[in-house]
Amino acid sequence: MSAAIKPMITLEEICTEAEKIRLSNPDLGDKIVSDIYQNAEMIAGPAVSKNSTDSRSWDHKLDDVLTSRLFGYPIMFALLSVIFWITIAGANVPSQMIADTLFAFQDQLLIWFELAGAPSWLTGILVLGMFRGLAWVIAVMLPPMAIFFPLFTLLEDLGYLPRVAFNLDNMFKKCRACGKQILTMCMGFGCNAAGVVSCRIIDSPRERLIAVLTNNFVPCNGRFPTLIAIATIFMGGMVVSELQIAVASLVVTSLVVLGIFVTFAVSWALSHTLLKGEASSMVLELPPYRKPQLGAIFYRSLIDRTIFVLKRAIIMAAPAGAITWMLANIYIEEISIIGYLAAWLQPFAYAIGLDGFILLAFILGLPANEIVMPILLMCYLSTGQMMEFGTLEELRDILINNNWTWLTAVCTMLFCLLHWPCTTALLSAYKETGSKKWTFLTFLIPTVIAFIVCFIVAQSARLLNLV
Amino acid sequence: MSNSTIEEHQKFLSEHFGISTTPGQFTVALAGNPNVGKSTVFNALTGLHQHTGNWPGKTVDNAQGSFTYLDRSFLMIDLPGTYSILAHTVEEQVARDFICFGKPDATLVVLDATCLERNLNLALQVMEITPKIIVCVNLIDEAEKKNIKIDISALQKDLGVPVVATAARNGKGLDTLRQKLYEMSTGLCTPAPRQINYSSEVENAIQQLLPKVSRLIGSNLNPRWVALRLLDGDKAFINSISQYLDFDLHSTRLQEVAV
């Protein structure tokens, strides 16, 4: 071994020596970086030739409009409304078709079960609980997702989303948060769990935590169908049918804007209390506009996101359907278990403009927001199972028969928008923050805000005799 | 590589980087600045054979995909998009550690043809670590639209490594890219990457450290580059050395790792 001849060297000794050299040339690190840049310049210079033209000018002009102080916000708002409009208008027909097919199959299932001589409780759990819950989730969830995701990915691919970040950067700076937070919010539209994970793009740990804690104020795809359905029935129901979809999309857009407003408010509050600090500076690149690849968009948004979210919904909806059916069909002295629970929650729920069943559905929907509506409908139908409602009209009748008013609808939508995240999102928050405390806060902050907002809305409406 | 070292290297990759290769599979690292169409290149080469995981112990995504060329299988590891690999952020550290210690059979650096100069920094930094590098000048179609001409052969001569012009969105240049990756991985191509010329004060500092560094680390890493990192005062790098090379501050020589 050569080391026998030469004196031994350890890494530590070399580090010490390097440290000495560094101390005698304090700007050595900067020098190394600037040397690299100079080399790059020397190589690129001869290899690149530019004919200056004004071909870039069109996208500069476009940027001037899209990121202008005057038009930036209205354009964002308009685009968001258009996306919701396309989603709501386009989802109706396929929803109807899927529902017809699945419920026709359910009738077939019932016949088979009867032929096989299955006991009624088994038929109840499997067909009226599991299959029906599943059918509802698929029929109501899949079409909006299959339309919304590709549209959103299209905006991403066009290069519009970074411009949104640019527009909102100033607002985030005022809240002492990071402009990239808007990108994590955009992910949240798909799924808050994915949104929480995407907070990794934020470098500063403080700003990353703020983004994690507030991501839930963007309604995810588990909550969209609920918001869309209620908005269409109650808000859209107030106007002539031609305007129904337009009004519904405006209501949903306003809810999203409210969510964004709450995000800013909570971010501001956090960075002035628990997470004190200044906004860090960052370089926000506006990449060039690109021609979107429609095939890739379609495939990725359908396969990657839609199927992923749907799979999760199915995994959650089937057991939840079975459990709800059991709770609704096991009677203790004339009243089902669900009835007991709802009655116990009633006073509390009434104070915030809901009823016991709605609050119960939100609680049972903790594993996945997709199943809140199906559970609620199971609860409402005295038979302890969901009726086959083919249209939103029938859904409306069910809700009105259960004493829904416009206030119930508004408070349910607000609660849906603001309430606690689902378990998957909470698990993601735990993985990302690695702390029980921050995960608990991720749960607590939205919950408290949802109760406060709904309480204020409900009490004011009643005081003013609006209901 | 003998069979036993191949197995050892496989084990090393899965333990340290969460990457599982099949025997005889080449690994290709994919590096590049953000927004240069790196994922487009990744998707175009690997199609739907991809999966996403996490770098062990880091909250950074780790996307891997595979493709086959001339009956050889390649596993492509999509490194986080970074402007440099001087380890200022977790992403840069992840990218640097994989190129440096994961010993990929080839490293593909994607550059944006419309701002080549800014992008070259990353390529030059990678070339200091590994000679097995292929430079992919992507978005060449956009550069053409902007009347930017890039002399690919001059660039190739100057850099001493294969340079391929691509427009990954339209699939242009991808075949050449696969071919070059194959040649680099199988050793058919012998690159001579141009090294960065440093100013005299940096060069003097390197020379002061170089003899000792060379003696300590042998042929595991490029000693010049290691000396530079030490002069940078790069604490993260010293941690990485001990983490990946079974080596601590008091060892007197490096354990031979599977290469």
Image: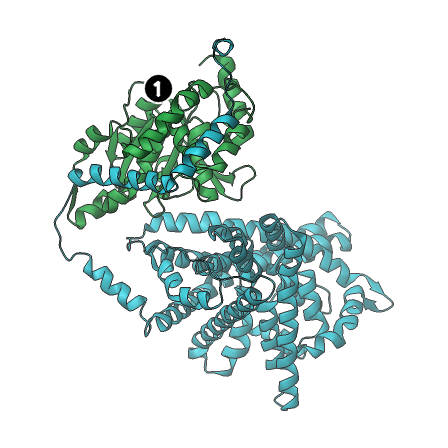
Percent across and percent down for residue A204 are 50, 53
The answer to whether residue A202 is left or right of residue A68 is right
Read off the residue under disc 1: B186
Of A376 and A92, nearer the camera is A376
Query: Identity of the amino acid at label 1?
Result: Thr
Quadrant including the C terminus of chain A:
bottom right
Percent across and percent down for residue A202 are 47, 53
| Rendering colour (chain A) | cyan
Residue at figure coordinates x 32%, y 45% from the top left: B36
Number of marks drawn: 1
Q: Chain of mark 1?
A: B
Examine the rendered structure and indicate whether residue A224 appears above or below residue B234. below
Residue at figure coordinates x 26%, y 64% from the top left: A62
Of B249 and A447, nearer the camera is B249
Percent across and percent down for residue A35 are 29, 38
Examine the rendered structure and indicate whether residue A4 appears above or below residue B18. above
Percent across and percent down for residue A248 are 48, 74
Of A342 and A123, nearer the camera is A342
The answer to whether residue A132 is left or right of residue A68 is right
Residue A317 lies in quadrant = bottom right
| Rendering colour (chain B) | green
Does residue A149 show up? Answer: yes
The answer to whether residue A189 is left or right of residue A52 is right
Residue at figure coordinates x 56%, y 49% from the top left: A311
Crowding at mark 1 (Cα within 10 Å: few <14, some 14-19, many 20+)? few
Of A250 and A47, nearer the camera is A47
Examine the rendered structure and indicate whether residue A65 appears above or below residue B20. below
**Numbered disc 1: secondary structure:** helix
Examine the rendered structure and indicate whether residue A257 appears above or below residue A34. below
